[in-house]
Image (spheres, helix red, strand yellow):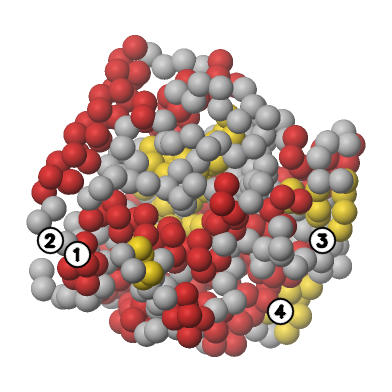
């Protein structure tokens, strides 16, 4: 496989996991309490913050070379959280439940600094643009980076260099292949075939009635990844180009600087009250709804796109994974290990570019898999015409078996091929998918989506005295950091915002 046999770099990929989850009351309704103070400041805490809502926790691991150590940190953070929630619980599914109305969803607060106000106004803008209910959808983000030794080896095989441009090109090839095949992940790990009726307030839909409070589609996999979830009609008309980093940046800039008619009607301010950061198609880069993103750590006050243009792509962030409702962490070791194999497959598969027609096929195949992925007769659209879903999925997964074998030969592990074989079994029998298992659970137990079982295993776990002390100290330090940021602000918010939005290039 491109000369990678026996290379120790195959064990050096870096991983990180982010998990979003709603805090709910024992009765199943969305928590109305503030972000618990025991967790520290959501503005500055490195591991525990909030996403859209004050009630929506976001858990962030550090960067790990081992999947197991990454999952271990995720476990420890969750254990700390569960013991700090008092009587509240974490909702185990991606799609929310127990939402009475838009006003009952508190937007996240971060403090009084310019940075805090920026984050809050961005979320207020999301609420105006898409509705607060949609923003409470949660998921798993999987971060993945390729080690230097792999880039060096690929450069040697191809007779090229391993400079930053070559790495940017490699990451973009990975992204293009991922976008082409991400429907497979939606099928294998989609776990939102149904939604609570409270989510559908004032929304048009074609879902079937499962019970008094649950709506579903018979062959659905991940409604989270369809029109009811993280999709934007406005964004669908703007093409982002992934053929080179300069083309990517240039295709993104208009969406960030040009006024969009629909959002211009909202207005940016009402007196002194901000309604959104800008009236562009995207307030910030993070508003782009995509199954995968090119990423680079930013410096204080630096835009994500500017960081990419200055220093290139550092890693990718996968965003199409539903939270696994059958696991208290929302993701298993097996899923994470499969993601490594799938992403390496995306890196190594040739792909010279993504045409506009291929981009449209990506969206079409995603929609078909979201709504009918478990239909045995489903066909997707490949560049050379229609293909049976099962045949195409089997072909990709068989290639992944070979990649899993490469990793096992170096790592000494014996589970990667087995994990891929388990995914092949899901393709052969759709009843093994998380979506089918969840639907079966609701049907057989006559259990509505709103009363999903809440795994209490985390409540039974404990941290060592040392780890508990570490978490408590990080929380206290985050509050000190927040106070320092607030004390250091020297310019009015309007100047801070204008400077951020200016795309200044000076280092």
Q: Is residue 272 above or below residue 263?
A: above
In front: mark 3 or mark 4? 3
Quarter residue 391 falls in: bottom right
Which badge, 1 or 4, comes first in the chain's sequence?
Answer: 4
Q: Would you say 122 lies left or right of 131 here?
A: left
Please identify the quadrant where the C terminus is shown: bottom left
Residue 247 seen in render: no
In front: mark 3 or mark 2? 2
Question: Do the CB atoms of the residues marked 1 and 3 lie less than 8 Å apart?
Answer: no
In front: mark 4 or mark 2? 2
Mark 4 highlights which residue?
A: 381
Q: Residue at x 50, y 41 (%)?
A: 55
Q: Position of residue 340 (x, y in %)?
A: 49, 51
Which badge, 4 or 2, comes first in the chain's sequence?
Answer: 4
Q: CA distance from mark 1 to mark 4?
A: 47 Å
Secondary structure, mark 4, is strand
Question: Do the CB atoms of the residues marked 1 and 2 lie less than 8 Å apart?
Answer: yes
Residue 90 seen in render: yes
Q: Residue at x 32, y 32 (%)?
A: 40
Q: Residue at x 67, y 63 (%)?
A: 228
Q: Position of residue 37 (x, y in %)?
A: 36, 29
Residue nearest the viewer, comparing 304 with 16 = 304
Residue situated furthest top in the rendering: 465
Q: Would you say 275 lies left or right of 405 here?
A: left
Q: Position of residue 329 (x, y in %)?
A: 55, 35
Q: Residues within 10 Å of mark 2 (few under 14, many from 20)?
A: few
Q: CA distance from mark 1 to mark 2?
A: 6 Å
Question: Do the CB atoms of the residues marked 3 and 4 lie less than 8 Å apart?
Answer: no
Mark 2 highlights which residue?
A: 491
Q: Residues within 10 Å of mark 1 (few under 14, many from 20)?
A: some
Mark 3 highlights which residue?
A: 207
Disc marking residue 496: 1
């Amino acid at each position: 496989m491109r000369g990678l046999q026996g290379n120790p770099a195959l064990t050096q990929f870096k991983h990180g996991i982010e998990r979003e989850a709603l805090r709910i009351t024992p009765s199943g309704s969305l928590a109305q309490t503030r972000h618990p103070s025991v967790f520290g400041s959501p503005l500055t805490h490195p591991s525990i913050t909030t996403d859209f809502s004050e009630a929506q926790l976001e858990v962030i691991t550090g960067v790990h070379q081992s999947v197991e150590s990454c999952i271990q940190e995720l476990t420890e953070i969750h254990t700390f959280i569960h013991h700090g929630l008092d009587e509240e619980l974490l909702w185990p599914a991606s799609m929310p439940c127990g939402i009475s109305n838009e006003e009952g969803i508190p937007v996240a607060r971060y403090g009084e600094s310019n940075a805090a106000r920026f984050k809050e106004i961005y979320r207020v803008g999301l609420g105006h643009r898409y509705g607060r209910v949609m923003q409470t959808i949660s998921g798993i983000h999987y971060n993945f980076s390729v080690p230097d030794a792999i880039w060096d080896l690929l450069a040697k095989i191809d007779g090229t260099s391993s400079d930053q441009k070559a790495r940017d090109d490699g990451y973009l090839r990975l992204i293009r292949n991922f976008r082409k095949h991400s429907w497979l992940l939606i099928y294998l790990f989609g776990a939102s075939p149904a939604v609570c009726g409270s989510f559908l307030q004032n929304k048009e839909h074609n879902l079937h009635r499962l019970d008094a409070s649950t709506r579903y589609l018979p062959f659905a996999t991940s409604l989270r990844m369809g029109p009811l979830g993280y999709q934007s009609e406005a964004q669908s008309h703007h093409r982002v180009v992934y053929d080179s980093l300069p083309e990517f940046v240039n295709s993104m800039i208009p969406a960030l600087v040009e006024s969009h008619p629909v959002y211009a009607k909202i207005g940016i301010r009402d007196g002194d009250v901000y309604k959104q950061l800008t009236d562009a198609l995207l307030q910030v880069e993070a508003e782009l709804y995509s199954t995968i993103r090119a990423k680079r750590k930013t410096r204080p006050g630096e835009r994500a796109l500017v960081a990419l243009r200055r220093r290139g792509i550092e890693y990718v962030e996968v965003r199409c994974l539903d939270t696994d409702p059958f696991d208290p962490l929302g993701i298993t070791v097996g899923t994470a290990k499969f993601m490594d194999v799938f992403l390496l497959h995306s890196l190594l598969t040739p792909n010279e570019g993504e045409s506009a027609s291929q981009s449209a096929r990506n969206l079409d195949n995603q929609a078909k898999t979201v709504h009918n992925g478990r239909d045995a007769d489903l066909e997707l659209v490949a560049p050379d015409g229609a293909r049976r879903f099962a045949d195409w999925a089997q072909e990709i997964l068989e290639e992944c078996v070979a990649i899993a074998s490469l990793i096992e030969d170096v790592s000494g592990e014996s589970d990667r091929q087995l994990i891929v074989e388990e995914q092949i079994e899901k393709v052969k029998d759709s009843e093994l998918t998380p979506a089918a298992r969840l639907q079966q659970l609701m049907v057989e137990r006559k259990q509505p989506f709103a009363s999903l079982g809440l795994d209490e295993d985390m409540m039974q776990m404990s941290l060592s005295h040392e780890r508990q002390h570490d978490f408590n100290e990080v929380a206290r330090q985050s509050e000190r950091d927040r106070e320092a940021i607030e004390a250091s602000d020297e310019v009015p918010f309007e100047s801070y915002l204008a400077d951020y939005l200016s795309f200044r290039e000076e280092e």
